[in-house]
Structures are given as C-alpha cells and as structure tokens.
Image: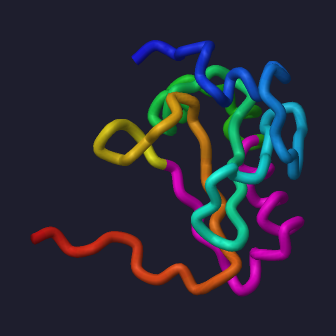
Amino acid sequence: MAYDRENIFAKILRGEIPCNKVYEDDHALAFHDINPQSPTHVLVIPKGAYVSNDDFTAKASDAELTGFFRAVGHVARALGVAEPGYRMIANTGVHGGQEVPHFHVHICAGRVLGGMIRPAG
C-alpha cells in the first residue's frame, strides 16, 4: 500500500491539524488520542512516511527505528505509567484494526486493562 500524504497524522505532522502534544523530537511526535480508550491514551507516530509497522521496520533507518522506540519509552516514563504498567499497541492492516494509514503506537494506561484478545470461537 502506498503512503497517503493526506491521512490525518500526516496533516498533524505538517501542522495543518492541531494536536494536544505530549512530546516531540527529531524522530517522533506524541499526542493525546481524541477518542481515548483508557484514562491515559497517547499516540506516538514517527515523522517519516510509513504506512504500518511492517513498512516502518522494513524501510526506516536504524536511527529512525531507535529514535522512535526511545521516544515511546520516554513518553511512557514522562506520563508516569512505566510503573504500574501500560499497553503498547500497534495495529497493522485491515485484520489488525489499523484505522489510520500512518504507523503509530498507542500507549494505553491508567487502569487494569484486562485480557487482550478473546479466544477464537
């Protein structure tokens, strides 16, 4: 799938749509989700044009990969959720439930989140 430069996260990165910023560096931008699914729900996106985790891990430079995941850890610590814990989610593709075609990680925390996936059946 080709990267869509008109997706909402691309517009946020360009400053065309505002966000409630939590963190920003050379490799990543983190901001509060507008439809939070937990008391703390922050999105972390790379600044590069990557559709999904698969695209990001295949094409990003070592500096982008390292910088992005360091940013995720920094944000979790800055939010004070590293202890007692948080969930880091990266939905990929239609079956994974990805809604925006720009790679992103959800940091969800602030309560016990329970089980992740229900058994098939």
When the figure is inspected, residue 22 is found, relative to residue 12, above or below; the finding is below
Quarter of the C terminus within the rendering: bottom left
| Numbered circles on residues, count | 0
82 is within the stretch colored magenta: yes
Left or right: residue 6 compared with residue 73: left
Quarter of the N terminus within the rendering: top left
Q: Residue at horizontal 78%, vertical 38%? A: 28
Left or right: residue 22 compared with residue 51: right
Relative image position of residue 85 (x, y in whole percent): 67, 79
35 is within the stretch colored magenta: no
When the figure is inspected, residue 5 is found, relative to residue 67, above or below; the finding is above
Snapshot quadrant of residue 60: top right
Foreground pick, 52 / 97: 97
Q: Residue reaching furthest left?
A: 121
Relative image position of residue 26 (x, y in whole percent): 87, 32
Instruction: Tell me which segment is drawn in magenta.
Output: 68-90
Relative image position of residue 38 (x, y in whole percent): 62, 70
Relative image position of residue 98 (x, y in whole percent): 44, 41
Foreground pick, 64 / 108: 108
Q: Residue at horizontal 60%, vertical 42%? A: 104
Coloration of the structure image: rainbow
Q: Residue at horizontal 45%, vertical 34%? A: 54
Q: Residue at horizontal 73%, vertical 42%? A: 68
